[in-house]
Image: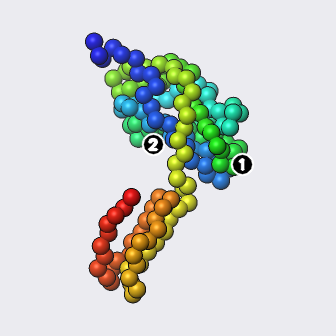
Amino acid sequence: MSWLRPYAAKAKIEHEFDTDHLNIFVTFRFTMDESVKPPNGLWLCEVDDVVKAITASAWQDAWTLLLTVPNIAVNPDRVTLEYDGPNENLRITWDKQWEPWGPIVSVELPPVYTTRTFSTGPAQQNDVDVSNVNVLFLNCAANDIIIGGFV
C-alpha cells in the first residue's frame, strides 16, 4: 500500500548567508504538524566540512522549517543537513513521523539584501538588469509600462 511508504529524504534544503549566521530552510514534501518541532540537536549541519550547531528553529508555514546556524563569518562553499530522527515531534499532519535521512547538500539562495527600485520616466528604460534581485519595485504611476521577458 502506497500510504505505508516511509517519509524519508523528501525535503528540499536551501540556505542563505545573513551577515553573521546561516538561515537554513527545510521545505517538506507534505504538510507538517506546526504545533510541534524536534529538538535542535537532531539536525546535523556541516558548513564547509565543519560540524555546526543549530541554535534556533521556527515554522515558517505548513511546509517550511527555518533553522539558524550562528557564528558564520563568510558565505560558505558547501552546506549539508542531516536529520538524526525519527522523533515524535517531526511529523506530517496525519501523524506519520519522518524517518532519519543522511546528509543532503543545501542549495544557496540569492542574497537577502538585493532590492531595487525603478521608475518608468521620463527616459525610457530597456533591458534593465534584474539578475540576483529578490525584490523589485516598479514605480509606474505617471507612465505606461510594459513588462516582459523575465528570465
Give the label on residue 54, or none.
none
Residue topped by disc 1: 73
Residue topped by disc 2: 60
Locate residue 128: give its quadrant.
bottom left
Location of residue 65 in the rendering, given as x and y in whole percent from the top left corner:
48, 37
Q: Residues within 10 Å of mark 1 (few under 14, many from 20)?
A: few
Report the amino acid beneath label 1: Ala
Report the amino acid beneath label 2: Gln
Q: How is the image coloured?
A: rainbow
Q: Residues within 10 Å of mark 2 (few under 14, many from 20)?
A: few
**Structural distance between the alpha carbons of marks 2 and 1:** 25 Å
Residue 35 in view (yes/no): no
Number of labels in the image equals 2
Q: Residue at x 65, y 53 (%)?
A: 19
- Going by the image, does 27 lie left or right of 81? left
Q: Nearer the viewer, mark 2 or mark 1?
A: 1
Pick the front one: 149 or 32: 149
Q: Residue at x 61, y 28 (%)?
A: 44
Location of residue 53 in the rendering, given as x and y in whole percent from the top left corner:
66, 33
Residue 78 in view (yes/no): yes
Q: Quadrant of the N terminus?
A: top left
Q: Secondary structure at mark 1?
A: loop
Location of residue 64 in the rendering, given as x and y in whole percent from the top left corner:
44, 38
